[in-house]
Image (cartoon, rainbow, N blue to C red):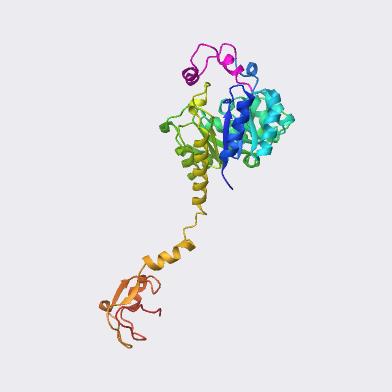
């Protein structure tokens, strides 16, 4: 199955429909499978007193609150329909990450999306996780800032929601052991892909711990991917080589635009380059069976050696070590059979340089 590349537009539309529409176009032109936005009602996400993250303060400056920042970055409900239709016309999937219950319902019931992304910051938001689980959508769960135990608890609660459509858990203890149920694990495995992630913008390469993506797969037996916040394209391409089935990467039309995420985003040409690199790695991965490719046959004949007569050998001679050498081409008897010929009687005559024939 091909790696799914999610071009994360996020809030890089800066509150402009025209810019959001251009992001859809650029993602499609780059060859992405999905372009993803973020859907939220700021007042339902953050309190008035919540400060911006350090990277947001660094990128934006000013002393406005997180709430004030997010209000400027909301994707208006009516824009979703036009962007979805634009995606359909350009043959790229529309997605958006909901950050609150009304936004989730809007995406599922009005936009009728088939896949939802659970953002890293909502991995411990129990009530919203239950709504994700009960949405009927396939789920992509990002795990930035999380421990393996927090991932297990989130998956357990999702498992509860997949199993129990109306009954809520009575306590933390009631759902936290759900993961031990094989049937529920299989249900979760059929619906959820987990993304490894480092929630820093940009994330220094030494903070990525890409091996943890494979640890998530081994521990939870789930499909895994990688949500990248590093600068450049090397790390997401490396993640594909390590088995990622989804790559998510922020992109923008211009890194110099004002906004919290532009500086940690790819520009269109870089997005194209990343996707081209991912497709190249995909083609190079193969089926895992160590065997020569058909294209190597000619090379093997040229580069490998065969058993060759080191001098004239007459029919009936007892073959000795000084009568055999290994020389190119490799189209004759393998030198691995050298010892099988020693001490045997030649069944025919050979001139110096002739390839020996199989017994």
Locate residue 279 relative to residue 43 in the image: left or right: left
Q: Residue at x 63, y 21 (%)?
A: 74
Residue 204 in the image, given as x and y percentages of width and height: 42, 30
Is residue 180 something one can see in this rendering? no
How many numbered marks, from 0 up? 0
Q: Residue at x 70, y 32 (%)?
A: 135
Q: Residue at x 29, y 80 (%)?
A: 352
User: Could you say which is closer to the camera, residue 26 or residue 334?
Assistant: 26
User: Could you say which is closer to the camera, residue 16 or residue 211?
Assistant: 16
Residue 42 in the image, given as x and y percentages of width and height: 63, 18
User: Could you say which is closer to the camera, residue 155 or residue 169?
Assistant: 155
User: Could you say which is closer to the camera, residue 37 or residue 322?
Assistant: 37
Q: Which residues are magenta?
A: 47-74
Q: Is residue 146 magenta?
A: no
Furthest-left residue in view? 322
Is residue 354 something one can see in this rendering? yes
Q: Is residue 161 above or below residue 101?
A: below
Residue 51 in the image, given as x and y percentages of width and height: 53, 14
Residue 303 in the image, given as x and y percentages of width and height: 37, 65
Of the 4 image quadrants, the one containing the C terminus is: bottom left
Locate residue 254 relative to residue 299 in the image: left or right: right
Locate residue 241 relative to residue 88 in the image: left or right: left
Q: Is residue 73 magenta?
A: yes
Q: Is residue 337 above or below residue 291?
A: below
């Amino acid at each position: 199955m091909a790696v799914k590349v999610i071009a994360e537009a996020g809030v890089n539309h800066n509150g402009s429909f025209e810019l959001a529409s251009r992001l859809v176009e650029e993602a499609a032109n780059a060859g992405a499978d999905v372009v993803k936005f973020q859907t939220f009602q700021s007042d339902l996400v953050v309190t008035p007193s919540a400060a911006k993250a350090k990277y947001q303060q660094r990128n934006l400056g000013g002393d406005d609150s997180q709430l004030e920042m997010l209000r400027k970055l909301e994707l208006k409900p009516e824009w979703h329909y036009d962007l979805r239709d634009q995606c359909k016309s350009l043959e790229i999937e529309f997605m958006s990450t909901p950050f609150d219950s009304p936004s989730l319902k809007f995406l599922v019931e009005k936009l009728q999306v088939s896949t939802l992304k659970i953002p890293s910051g909502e991995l411990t938001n129990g009530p919203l996780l239950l709504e994700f689980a009960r949405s009927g959508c396939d789920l992509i769960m990002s795990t930035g800032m999380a421990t393996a135990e927090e991932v297990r608890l989130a998956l357990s609660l999702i498992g509860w929601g997949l199993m129990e459509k109306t009954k809520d858990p009575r306590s933390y203890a009631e759902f936290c052991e759900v993961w031990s149920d094989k049937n529920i694990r299989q249900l979760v495995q059929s619906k959820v892909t987990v993304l490894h992630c480092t929630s820093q913008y940009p994330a220094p390469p030494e903070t990525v711990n890409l091996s943890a993506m494979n640890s998530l797969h081994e521990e939870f037996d789930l499909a895994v991917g990688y949500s990248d916040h590093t600068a450049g394209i090397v790390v997401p391409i490396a993640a594909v080589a390590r088995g990622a089935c989804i790559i998510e990467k922020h992109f923008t039309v211009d890194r110099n635009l004002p906004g919290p995420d532009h500086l940690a985003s790819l520009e269109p040409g870089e997005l194209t380059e990343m996707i081209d690199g991912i497709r190249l790695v995909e083609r190079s991965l193969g089926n895992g069976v160590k065997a020569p490719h058909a294209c190597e046959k000619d090379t093997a004949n040229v580069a490998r050696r065969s058993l060759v007569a080191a001098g004239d050998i007459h029919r009936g001679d007892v073959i000795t070590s000084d009568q055999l050498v290994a020389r190119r081409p490799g189209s004759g008897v393998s030198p691995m059979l050298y010892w099988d010929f020693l001490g045997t009687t030649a069944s025919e005559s050979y001139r110096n340089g002739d390839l020996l024939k199989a017994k």
